[in-house]
C-alpha cells in the first residue's frame, strides 16, 4: 500500500523529470537562432518567421487577439480608466481610498504584450499564448477584484480542486477501493484554449451567479453591484479579464452541471485549472453522448477528451 509520503515523493520526482525535459527542449530551440525567437524544436528551418506564422495561425483560429500596428491606444485607455473610476467615486460606488488605490499614472503603465511559448512536449510544439499585462491600465482593478473573489471560489471548489499531481493518484486509490469495476472509465478533459476563449459576458455572469449562490453582500467594502460594474469594465478594456477569478468562475458556471452529474453517478471529478480528470462507471457510448451535450453549453468553450489506459493528465 502506498502512503501519502511515497505518493508525494513519486510525484515530485516525475514532475522534476518532466520540467527538466521541457527546459532542455526550450534551450535547444533557443540555440537555433541568435535572436532567441521561440521556434518549433522539431522544425529544421530555425527561422524567426516560423514563430510569426504560428502566431498568425493562432490569432486567425481564435479571433481573440488583434494586432494594433502603429496605433497607440494607451493614452486614451488611461484616460477612460481613470474617468470611469472618478465617476464611480462621485456616485459613491467606491470610497476615496479605493479610488486612489485603483487609479493609474501614465508613467507606470503600458499596453499588454502577447507572446508565445512552445508546448515542446506536444507534437508540432503548438504555441501557448502568454499575455504580459503587469502594467496594463486596468491591472490594479483586476488584482483588487481577484483578491476579493478568488478565495471565495477556492473555498467553494475545495473538494474538486487539485494542487499537486500526486492528489490524482491518492484520489484514484481511495475511489477504487469501493467503486472499481470492469467497465470503469478513466477520462481526462482539456478545455481548448480556455484562457483565450473564455466568454466575456458569460464570465461576468458567472461571478454574479457565484456571489448569488454564496449569498454574499458587500466584500471588502464593495457592494456586489460595484464588483460587477468593475468586472464589466475590465473585460471590455483588457485581454487579462480578471485572469484567475474569471477563469475559475466561468469553469464553475459552465460545468457545474457536469460535476453534479459525475458525482451523482458515483464517479469522481477533479480539476487543475482547465485540466479535468474523471473516473466514472459509464458505458463508453454514454460518455461520448454526454461530452457532445456538454460541448453545447457554450460554443466558445470546447472540451477535448481522452479516455482509456494509460491517459495523459497535467501535460
Image: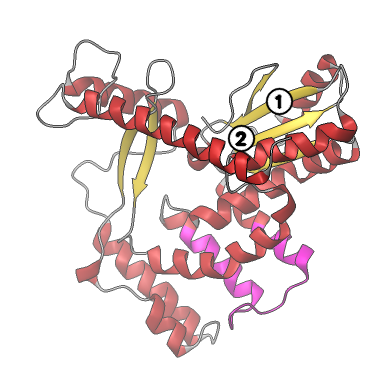
- For the residue pair 63 and 290, the one nearer the viewer reads as 290
Q: Quadrant of residue 33?
A: top left
Indicate the secondary structure of the residue bearing disc 2: loop
Q: Quadrant of residue 199?
A: top right
Q: Position of residue 64 (x, y in %)?
A: 44, 38
Q: Is residue 133 visible?
A: yes
Q: Which residue is mark 1?
A: 187
The quadrant of the rendering that contains the N terminus is top right
Q: Residue at x 55, y 33 (%)?
A: 314
Apparent side of residue 314 relative to residue 282 in the rendered image (left or right): left
- For the residue pair 278 and 203, the one nearer the viewer reads as 278
Residues shaded magenta? 207-234
In the displayed structure, would residue 81 be above or below residue 304?
below
Q: Position of residue 184 (x, y in %)?
A: 83, 22
Q: Which mark is residue 301?
A: 2
How many numbered marks, from 0 up?
2
Q: Residue at x 30, y 14 (%)?
A: 42
Task: Say how the picture is coloured.
Answer: secondary structure
Query: What is the distance, in whole Å, between disc 2 and disc 1 at their CAs?
Result: 18 Å
Q: Is residue 230 visible?
A: no
Amino acid at each position: 500500500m502506498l502512503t501519502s509520503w511515497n505518493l508525494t515523493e513519486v510525484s515530485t520526482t516525475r514532475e522534476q523529470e518532466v520540467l527538466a525535459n521541457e527546459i532542455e527542449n526550450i534551450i535547444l530551440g533557443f540555440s537555433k537562432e541568435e535572436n532567441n525567437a521561440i521556434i518549433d524544436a522539431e522544425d529544421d528551418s530555425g527561422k524567426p518567421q516560423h514563430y510569426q506564422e504560428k502566431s498568425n495561425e493562432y490569432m486567425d483560429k481564435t479571433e481573440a487577439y488583434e494586432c494594433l500596428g502603429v496605433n497607440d491606444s494607451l493614452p486614451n485607455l488611461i484616460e477612460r480608466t481613470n474617468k470611469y473610476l472618478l465617476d464611480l467615486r462621485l456616485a459613491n460606488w467606491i470610497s476615496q481610498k479605493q479610488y486612489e488605490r485603483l487609479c493609474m499614472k501614465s508613467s507606470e503603465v503600458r499596453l499588454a504584450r502577447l507572446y508565445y511559448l512552445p508546448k515542446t512536449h506536444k507534437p508540432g510544439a503548438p504555441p501557448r499564448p502568454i499575455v504580459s499585462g503587469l502594467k496594463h491600465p486596468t491591472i490594479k482593478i483586476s488584482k483588487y477584484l481577484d483578491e476579493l473573489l478568488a478565495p471565495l471560489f477556492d473555498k467553494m471548489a475545495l473538494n474538486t480542486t487539485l494542487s499537486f499531481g500526486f492528489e490524482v493518484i491518492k484520489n484514484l486509490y481511495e475511489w477504487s477501493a469501493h467503486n472499481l469495476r470492469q467497465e470503469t472509465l478513466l477520462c481526462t478533459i482539456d478545455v481548448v484554449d480556455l484562457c483565450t476563449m473564455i466568454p466575456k459576458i458569460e464570465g461576468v455572469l458567472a461571478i454574479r451567479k457565484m456571489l448569488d449562490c454564496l449569498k454574499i453582500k458587500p466584500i471588502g467594502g464593495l457592494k456586489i453591484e460595484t464588483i460587477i460594474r468593475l468586472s464589466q469594465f475590465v473585460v471590455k478594456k483588457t485581454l487579462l479579464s480578471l485572469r484567475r477569478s474569471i477563469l475559475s468562475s466561468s469553469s464553475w458556471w459552465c460545468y457545474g452541471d457536469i460535476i453534479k452529474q459525475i458525482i451523482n453517478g458515483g464517479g469522481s471529478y477533479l480539476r487543475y485549472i482547465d485540466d479535468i480528470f474523471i473516473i466514472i462507471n459509464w458505458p463508453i457510448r454514454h460518455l461520448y453522448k454526454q461530452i457532445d451535450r456538454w460541448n453545447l453549453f457554450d460554443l466558445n468553450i470546447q472540451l477535448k477528451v481522452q479516455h482509456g489506459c494509460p491517459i495523459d493528465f497535467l501535460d
